[in-house]
């Protein structure tokens, strides 16, 4: 059984004992920041958890119990999940309500996945796909967000899912599905945002239709659920928002709008590995400034909703790109979401059990794939700027290659060392641990 796909995403924040204490929902925006009801900065440090592929089930649940996966997300320092979903989940009643998890796996002859699912998540194996999507551990312990129309892997210019009017992308159906999904989670306080479409692309893309339909989609989501952030993606695989520099988005509501971009090394071919990485970084950051970073100066939130690397560590192109990205992300203190949580897939592009080497977890969903990578992004998981409780000001010199900070010895001012932060013991006290290690007089801005 084959299903074409398109997907959208939910954002859900982790609200168990590990989160920032006393966070006041719902979230909104203040200037370029995402804030809670008390006006304090809430930095989204998310991880993508795919649920949009052909079985239409959150990946990994044949390997581990859903609550164990949720716990691992927090242990790795993430505070929210970008949970992807296919539009068919809201438009195909038969698929959503009459197909169980077991039946979905059976339709693709995934016998081993059924056995694993029965072992690790027995209460979910015989419930409908929509009920599995709404399971408590996904939406009551995590922060969430849509990806495409039909279930499957994304994305290509010619897959019929790229832009409004494509074969599988009817804007009227899309708008109705957005409204229905937003209404489904109205009142679920930790569902904090909703992205309207993943990676718009293809020969039909144009600015006028982007404004027409993205504004309609945004109004549909807000009319059904006034609590969620409304997240708009750009053109050219979500790499370009340059067109909103001179033409603002016109909506009936305020303080809920966020823009998103994607940034991967492979978008520039193999240039990071074959050229001087400082030259490439300068060129790419200039392009990023024109295509999206300008939004921060305009007082609009910019969310890096996908980035990632081959976590086996041997990809020079990815490794050099990550240093550039980390420096930019730290300097601008942007909200972000890593691609991906996924250690492996039930079924991807016809391959059963395909390993995701960009995944933070290993193929058994049991262990961290690359602890050095988590160290490298650990500083980026903490809010460094923005509104909130005032503390003594301090400056940091950040070393993107390692994720460490440059320390000047208090005893010998000529001695500089790279020092590792203490391991986080929960997102709520990460700032306290950070400030206890580093002192204002030890740093200058890089």
Image (cartoon, grey):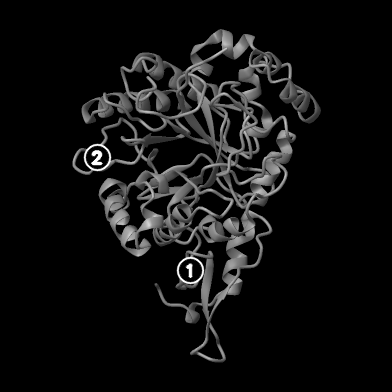
Give the alpha-carbon distance from disc 2 to disc 1, as whole Å. 33 Å
Question: x%, y% of residue 401?
Answer: 49, 64
Whether residue 146 can be seen here: no
Specify the quadrant of the image occupied by residue 122: top right
Question: x%, y% of residue 446?
Answer: 39, 72
Specify the quadrant of the image occupied by residue 199: top left
Q: Which residue lies furthest to the front in this view?
A: 274
Packing grade of label 2 (10 A; few <14, some 14-19, many >=20) is some
Residue position for label 2: 244
Q: Residue furthest left?
A: 246
Question: x%, y% of residue 143?
Answer: 57, 39
Locate the N terminus by quadrant. top right
Secondary structure of the residue carrying tag 2 is helix
Number of residue marks: 2
Q: Which residue lies furthest to the right in this view?
A: 119
Name the residue: 42% across, 30% down: 155
| 408 lies above or below 304 | below
Of 214 and 200, the residue lying toward us: 200
Whether residue 268 can be seen here: yes
Tag 2 near tag 1, CB within 8 Å? no
Question: x%, y% of residue 357?
Answer: 58, 43
Packing grade of label 1 (10 A; few <14, some 14-19, many >=20) is some
| 345 lies above or below 327 | above
Of 41 and 371, the residue lying toward us: 371
Q: Residue 364 carries which label?
A: none
Specify the quadrant of the image occupied by residue 128: top right
Q: Mark 2 or 1 closer to N-term?
A: 2
Residue position for label 1: 399
Judged by depth in the image, the label closer to the viewer, 2 or 1, is 1
In the image: residue 187, left or right of residue 396:
right
Name the residue: 52% across, 71% down: 405
Secondary structure of the residue carrying tag 1 is strand
């Amino acid at each position: 059984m084959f299903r074409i796909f398109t997907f959208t995403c939910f954002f859900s924040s982790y609200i168990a004992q590990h989160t920032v204490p006393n966070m006041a929902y719902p979230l909104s925006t203040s200037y370029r920041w995402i804030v809670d009801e008390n006006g304090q900065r809430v930095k989204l440090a998310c991880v993508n958890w795919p649920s949009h592929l052909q079985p239409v089930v959150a990946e990994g649940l044949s390997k581990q119990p859903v609550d164990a996966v949720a716990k691992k997300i927090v242990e790795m320092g993430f505070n929210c999940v970008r949970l992807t979903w296919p539009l068919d989940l809201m438009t195909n009643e038969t698929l959503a309500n009459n197909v169980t998890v077991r039946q979905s796996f059976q339709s693709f002859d995934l016998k081993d996945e059924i056995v694993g699912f029965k072992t690790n998540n027995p209460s979910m194996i015989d419930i409908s796909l929509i009920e599995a999507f709404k399971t408590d551990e996904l939406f009551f312990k995590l922060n969430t967000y849509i990806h495409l129309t039909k279930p499957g892997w994304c994305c290509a210019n010619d897959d019929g899912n790229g832009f409004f009017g494509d074969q599988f992308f009817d804007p009227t159906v899309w708008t109705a599905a957005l409204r229905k999904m937003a209404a489904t989670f109205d009142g679920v306080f930790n569902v904090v945002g909703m992205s309207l479409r993943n990676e718009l692309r293809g020969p039909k893309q144009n600015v006028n239709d982007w404004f027409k339909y993205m504004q309609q989609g945004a109004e549909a989501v807000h009319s059904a659920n006034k609590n969620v952030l409304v997240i708009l993606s750009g053109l050219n695989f979500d790499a370009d928002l340059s067109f909103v520099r001179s033409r603002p988005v016109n909506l009936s509501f305020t303080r809920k709008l966020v823009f998103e971009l994607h940034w991967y090394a492979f978008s520039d071919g193999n240039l990071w590995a074959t050229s001087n990485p400082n030259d490439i970084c300068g060129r790419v950051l200039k392009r990023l400034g024109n295509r999206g970073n300008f939004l921060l100066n305009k007082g609009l939130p910019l969310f890096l909703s996908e980035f990632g690397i081959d976590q086996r560590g041997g990809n020079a192109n990815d490794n050099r790109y990550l240093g550039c990205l980390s420096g930019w992300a730290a300097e601008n203190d942007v909200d972000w979401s890593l691609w991906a949580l996924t250690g492996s897939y039930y079924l991807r592009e016809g391959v059963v059990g395909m390993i995701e080497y960009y995944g933070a977890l290993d193929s058994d969903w049991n262990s961290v794939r690359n602890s050095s990578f988590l160290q490298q992004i650990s500083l980026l998981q903490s809010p460094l700027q923005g509104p909130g409780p005032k503390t003594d000001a301090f400056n940091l010199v950040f070393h993107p290659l390692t994720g460490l900070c440059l320390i000047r010895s208090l005893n010998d001012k000529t001695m500089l060392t790279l020092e590792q932060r203490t391991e986080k013991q929960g997102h709520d006290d990460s700032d306290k641990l950070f400030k206890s290690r580093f002192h204002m007089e030890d740093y200058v801005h890089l």
